[in-house]
Image (tube, grey):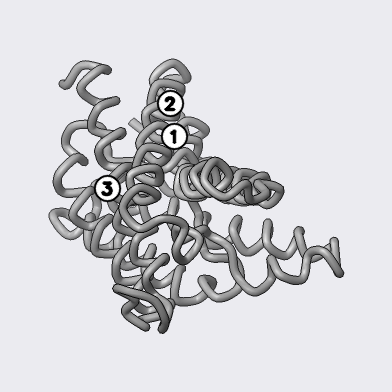
């Protein structure tokens, strides 16, 4: 067993990795500007999915490689982590995500909004305020899929050595499906990091961030409760 400090460091590094690679891919996925790939949502989905596979295999044995406050919340509600350890994980995850975003701000500036996790629906909120609940719902549903994959593969231990690939593929599929609509964050740390850096660097609003906390936490928490209640072997 690793100490809580080593586990927290693994969560910090893992979340830094996910936000750095994912946000950079998002920032450079357009078709104009120096370094832009033009890969769109496909490039973003692949970057996040592949990064998560690497993170899970590198840091999973140390901390579980949650690298996502919503995953930790789902694991907490499923009774697989203590509240004290969950709080330490959340601090490490948010710190890793924010630091990654500020490093990107230094490297590429505010180009591509630092890969902020927003989509077409966010553009409609000013004229149609009720759209915020569509964003929350999409984020909740996508996060439910992600956290059920975590439970079905990593927590339950049913997929053997393939568990990292299974989780990474679900993340990529979620982004392919919902990325154009909401940014498909599924991760409050992934959203908060670029939002804070953009706010500090360009004075942009952070009004949208709450939706990317509520949706993923609801979806992740529900997944943890459902999977633990009905599908985990009771010892």
Q: Nearer the viewer, residue 215 or 100?
A: 100
For residue 183, above or below residue 63: below
Name the residue tied to disc 1.
Answer: 94
Horizontal placement of 112 versus 48: left or right?
right
**Whether residue 223 can be seen here:** no
> What whole-number distance in Å separates the C-alpha atoms at marks 3 and 2?
16 Å
Residue hosting label 2: 91
Vertical side of 186 occupied by 98: above or below = above
- Distance from disc 1 to disc 2, alpha carbons, whole Å, reads 5 Å
* Residue 180 visible, this orientation: yes
The answer to the question of whether label 1 and label 2 lie on touching residues, with beta carbons closer than 8 A, is yes
Q: Kindly identify the residue that appears in the image at 46 percent across and 22 percent down.
A: 87
- Name the residue nearer the viewer: 150 or 97: 97
Residue 125, percent across and down?
78, 64
Q: Which residue is mark 3?
A: 17
Q: Dot 3 surroundings within 10 Å: few (below 14), some, or many (20 or more)? A: many
Left or right: residue 39 versus residue 211 is: left
| Rendering coords of residue 180 (x, y %) | 55, 75
């Amino acid at each position: 067993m690793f100490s809580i400090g080593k586990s927290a460091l693994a969560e910090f590094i893992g979340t830094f990795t996910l936000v750095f690679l994912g946000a950079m891919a998002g920032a450079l996925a357009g078709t104009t500007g120096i370094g832009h790939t033009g890969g769109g949502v496909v490039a973003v989905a692949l970057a996040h999915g592949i990064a998560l596979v690497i993170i899970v295999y590198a840091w999973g044995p140390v901390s579980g490689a949650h690298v996502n406050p919503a995953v930790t919340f789902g694991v907490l509600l499923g009774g697989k982590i203590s509240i004290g350890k969950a709080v330490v994980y959340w601090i490490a995850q948010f710190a890793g995500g924010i630091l990654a975003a500020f490093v990107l701000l230094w490297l590429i500036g505010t180009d591509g909004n630092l890969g902020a996790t927003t989509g077409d629906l966010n553009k409609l909120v000013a004229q149609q305020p009720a759209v915020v609940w569509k964003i929350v719902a999409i984020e909740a549903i996508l996060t439910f899929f992600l956290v059920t994959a975590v439970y079905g593969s990593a927590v339950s231990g049913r997929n053997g050595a393939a568990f990292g690939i299974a989780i990474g593929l679900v993340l990529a599929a979620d982004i392919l499906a919902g990325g154009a609509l909401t940014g498909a964050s599924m991760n409050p740390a992934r959203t908060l990091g670029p939002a804070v850096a953009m706010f500090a660097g360009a004075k942009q609003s952070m009004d949208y961030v709450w939706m990317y906390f509520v949706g993923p936490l609801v979806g992740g928490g529900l997944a943890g409760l459902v999977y633990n209640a009905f599908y985990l072997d009771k010892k």
